[in-house]
Structure formats: structure tokens, C-alpha cells
Amino acid sequence: MNRLNSTFLLHGGDYNPEQWQKYPAILDQDFKMMQEAHANTVTVGMFSWSAIEPEEGVYHFEWLDDVFDRMEKIGGKVILATPSGARPAWLAQKYPEVLRTNEKGEKLLFGERHNHCFTAPIYREKVREFNTLLAKRYGQRKGLLMWHISNEYGGECHCDLCQAAFRNWLKNKYGTLEALNDAWWTTFWSHCYTDWSQIHLPSPLGDTSLQGLNLDWRRFVSDQTINFYENEIKPLRLITPDVPITTNFMSDTFDMVPFHGLDYYKFAKHLDVVSWDCYPAWNNDFETPAQTGMKVAMIDDYFRSLKQQDFLIMESTPSQVNWHPVNHAKRPGVHQLASLQHIAHGSDSNLYFQWRQSRGASEMFHGAVITQNGSNQTRVFKDVKQVGMDLTKLSEIKDVPYQCAEVAIVFDQSNMWALNDSQNYSMATKKYWQTLQQHYQYFWQHDIPVDIISPETDLAKYRLVIDPMHFLMAEKFMDKLAKFASNGGTVVGTYISGVVDERDLAYIGGWPTQLQQLYGLTVKETDTLYPQQANEIKAGDHGYRATDYCEILEVDTAEVLASYTQDFYAGTAAATNHPVGQGSAYFIACRTDTDFLADFYQKIVADIGLNKQQSIIKDSSSVSIQIREDKTNEYLFVLNFDSKQHEILVNDPMIELLSNQEQEGKSNIEPFGVKVYRRLK
């Protein structure tokens, strides 16, 4: 695996000098201000195809050569992107098959970005040719840090080429039409296929209600995207085998949900380094900054967990974006807090989109380090400069890993696809990722590290595995959970789990035997509540709300921890614990508020003796303490996600790296403030 050849934390970001070739004074100003802001890395070439190849076979590399020359002169690095995310107009005009076809069979016009067919042979050929030229010209430049492949892969195509590729994918998976018909349960509505050519991609003009088809289509889109990516990187691997490769992953803006269109666990296996683009809605009107901070922390942990290694923030905004419903600016201090939060959770960079604000087109008002007035006196530029200074002071943290986690939360992309597609429960309240966030919250508030893992991940290093709402669950994973618990681990499962297998077929006979044995109970029924309805559960003398989903259990050998108090299932179990070998398995039968989960996990953490750091004591759960550590040092990031000042107690003498002062005892951390301590082990 190729590692980044860098001795510093990366600071800088997307740079588009091709937009400013008529303004040489602006280019000079850019590099002068990069040095002032302690920017050491630029990402170039993302959407530069037409600037480099304005017509077929005619190339202009001079402006890109200049970027390398300037960055190498100041000791900086270049992340060079391949331009396949947006092809030039001449290419679409000459080779119209490269344009996508929508689900209604309509060929799309040239425009936007990511409007290309991943299957089209001519597009694959043109991309490979272009990337070969890039690798030969820049592969040996000392400023080249890594390859950035395309940009934010996503979307799908329904052309005849993709139809044929999908059918071939299905043939490889199922072998026979009989096996496919069984997997998709096509006898329902008389949908049995008798020839492969009868299978059509999901479309409102045809079939969108066949869950097996929908699920396999999403899996195919993910595989075909990865296949296209592999085609892109062939010349880069051949010509520059030692240069690491990444592509930028995405998440939802408001709930920080991983991009639903691709299986990132599968995709990450093909990357040297995971990178992602982070655009949360800081200081919004629907949650506290601490709640936003918790969501960002969890998605950072997810991307770090994809390869169990440090990652990169490839894009973020130093101020605001231009595509939120409300494009709110960051409050004073929040940019430093947000940037160092990523570093705290294992990022080796904080990069921006974009360096200089565009003068026109769709993202002309998107936040940038240099705004359209070109000044270094803006609040945004000063904030970025501060972060640049911070990252320089923290350069020793480069390559120091995030602390090892003993807690894991399972996230299954196929499960998300199947659950969202299921015509059951409530479409408005399924909220799979948001449910995982509720379980994550206790651990974030108590500074207990968490990995977000897939069903394929080895469980051996964990002590607690939390597996909420695992609707689509393979029997293989049930066996894996049982083995983990039997060997001394603790498992937590919840409602709406083990309903269908990996083909999205319901288990015959009800709840699977493996889960009955693991949890010591049987799920008999799931009650879906309306948004204004609620039940109550009682655990000892404490009462808690139950909303959205309540499962009725038949308890066998499990211990009842909480019971319902209302409705026809009043008095039946709502939460249980079951000894399994040397470990145990807990089951939560209903959706609760986080007050129940806080009490629930507090007891589990105490019972199994999970380690909590005691080097720094905080007075509020709005303050987060995250640790990166190696054999010699602990680096403790203290992050205040509150508009109020808080007090911390430093129990050992430590160096606070941002101020370069030794501290011990009580001190204050300012609103939205950050402190970073080095503690000798």
C-alpha cells in the first residue's frame, strides 16, 4: 500500500488556475497568499480537461507545468486529479455514446458534471489515454504527492451498453435464470424471466417494485463504478507505481449520512488512502453545535474505519457553501474547531474547496480562502491562516494513528438500500444512519473511541459490537456475532433486525434460529407507531419514551431489563440481556430517546470495564476529547462545541502544542475553542 510522502499535515485545497490565465497578477497573488496562509498543498486538474485538451489531440500543459514549478519552488505538494468527472463539449459532440441515459430512456444533453456513461468503451479509452499523458508528464515531478481520481463518483446510466453490462453481471452472479427468479421471487405478479434479454434496469416505465432487482442494480452500479475507476488508474499504476491514489467520497450535508449511491466499504479496498468531502451545516437552527459536532465525528470515524488508517479531508469550506437551503457563515472560532476536529479523528489534512472564489458559473458564491475581493484582511482568510499555523505546530502528529477502538458500530450499505426500499414500517421514520448516530452519541460524549465497521470486518479486536436495525442480515454474519459473543464479546442488537437475507428474501419460519439462540428470545411482531404516538418502557424505577417501532418479544432464556407499560403488549419485554458463552447479547426491542441509551450504555461500559481516558477531566459533554497516539506519546485534542466557556482539569503536566506552554491543573477552554496536549506515555 502506498503511503503519502509528506512530512507535514496537508493544508490548501482545490485550485483552478485555468480560470485565471488571462490575469497573471492574480496567479502571482495566489501563491503569495498561499505562503501567508501556510498552505502547502494544492489539488489541480479536477475539471480541467477542456483547458488541457481544447480540441481532440491538441494539448496545452503550460499552465499546469507552471503550478508544479511554483509549488516546488515554495516546498509545496500537488495532488493531481484526473479530469473524467466532466468531459469537454467536443468529446460529447463527437462521441455521444459517452453521455448518460436516464431511467426513462432519454439521452441526456451535454452539461453539468458526472454526465457520462461508465460502460462506454470510447469514454474509457479517452480517459485512459489522457491519464497516460498525465502520468508520463508529471509522474516524476518531486512535487507530485498523489493521484486524485475523477471527482465525487456517483450517478447511474440506463443506456443499452449498461443494460447489457448489468445482464452480464447478473449471469456471473446467478449462473441461471432459475436461480435469479428464485432470488428475486419473480413468481409474484407473474414476473418470471425466461430470457436474459427480458431483464430491464429499474425504471418508472417498467419495474421499480421488485426489491431484488433494485438491490442488485444498486450493487451493480457500485461495482461498475469501481470497474471504471480501475480502468482510470491502470496507466497510473503502471507508470507511477509508488504514487498513492485516492478519490473523494461524499456524505449528506445535514445528517452526515454516507453517500447512498455506492458501497464505500467495497470501493475503499481499491484506494491507497481514503479521502472525503465534508460540508456540515454549522450553527444551524435545528440542532446544537455539539450535535453537529457529534455527527461530523461519527462520519470521520466511518471514513477512518474503511481502511482502519488515517484519512484525508479532501474538501471542506472555510466559510459557507452555495447550495444549502440557507448558506450560513461559520461563527468566529468554528473554522478552527471544525478543522482540528478532523485532525483529532485521524485526518492528515484539512483541504478546501476552493482556494479562490470563481468569478462566474454555478459555484461562484461558494466559500473560498480568497474571496472575490482578493483581500487577505477578510475574517475567512485570517481563520484559514490560523488553521495553517496550527497545522504547522502539529506537524509531529502526521502518521500518528487515532487511538485503537474497543467499540464498533455495524453499518451495512446493502442493508441501507434494502431497508429504504422495503415497503413496510414507515418511510419517514426508518432513519437507519440516524439510529446509529443515537447509539454513537453516548460514546462520543464520554470520549470512548468507536469504529464504524462493515459485516466483513474482523471483530476480534473489539469488546463491544453494536448492530442496530440490521434488517438485511446474512446467516454468515449471525454466526459471526454468535462466535464473537461466545468468545467473550458483548453484542447489542435492536428492532428490525434479521428480517431478510442477503437476497432481500424473508426468512422462512420467522426470526432466524441463530438470532433466537444469540439473544435468548423470539421476535413475534413489529408495531409501527404513527409520529404522534408513543409507548413507555420501565427499567427499574425509571421510565423512558418508546417511539416509531416497538417489537413484541417472546422471551426464552434472556433476562428482562425493561418492559412496556402501555398498549396490548404492556408488561412484555422491551430490553433484554442474554449470557452467551463467555460474553453476552443485549436486545433493544424499541426505538427510544437517547436518555435510555445513555443509561443503558453506561451500565454496559461499567460492567465490561471499557477504558476511559482520565488524563483530562471535562465539565460538559459538549466538550470532546479525542486521542491520537503512538508508542511514545498521546496527543489529546480538547474541542469545545459550545458557545460557552468550559473548565477542564489537566491531571498530568503536559505541553499544550498550540500555545507551546506546559499546563497542569484547572484551565478554561473558550467558546468553540481548541487545545491540543502532548502527554508522554
Image (tube, rainbow, N blue to C red):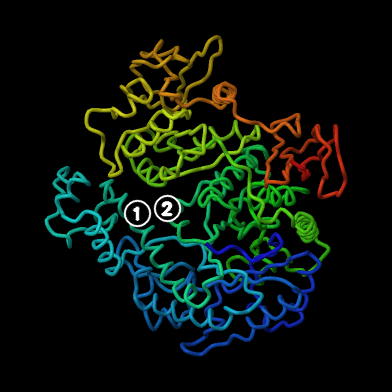
Seen in the picture, residue 446 relative to 674 is either above or below; the reply is above
Say which mark, if any, is on residue 263.
2
User: At 66% from the left edge and 76% from the top edge, which residue is drawn?
Assistant: 142
Residue at which label 1 appears:
219
In the image, residue 460 lies at what x, y percent? 47, 38
Which amino acid, by three-letter code, is at mark 2?
Answer: Asp
Assign a secondary structure to mark 2: loop
Q: Determine if residue 494 is in view.
A: no
Q: Is residue 333 left or right of residue 135?
A: right
Say which mark, if any, is on residue 559.
none
Which amino acid, by three-letter code, is at mark 1?
Answer: Arg
Seen in the picture, residue 297 relative to 96 is either above or below; the reply is above
Assign a secondary structure to mark 1: helix
User: At 45% from the left edge and 23% from the top edge, which residue is drawn?
Assistant: 533
Q: Quarter-wise, where is residue 117 in the image?
A: bottom left
For label 2, the crowd category at 10 Å Cα-Cα, with few meaning under 14, some 14 to 19 and many 20 or more, is some
In the image, residue 342 lies at what x, y percent? 65, 50
Seen in the picture, residue 454 relative to 56 is either above or below; the reply is above
User: At 48% from the left edge and 43% from the top edge, which residue is drawn?
Assistant: 453
Seen in the picture, residue 394 relative to 145 is either above or below; the reply is above
Q: Determine if residue 572 is in view.
A: yes
In the image, residue 232 lies at what x, y percent? 45, 72
Q: Nearer the viewer, residue 364 or 336?
A: 336
Q: Quarter-wise, where is residue 605 in the image?
A: top right
Q: Are marks 2 and 1 in contact (CB under 8 Å)?
A: yes
Quadrant in which the C terminus appears: top right
In the image, residue 529 lies at what x, y percent? 41, 26
For label 1, the crowd category at 10 Å Cα-Cα, with few meaning under 14, some 14 to 19 and many 20 or more, is some
Q: Is residue 346 left or right of residue 111?
A: right
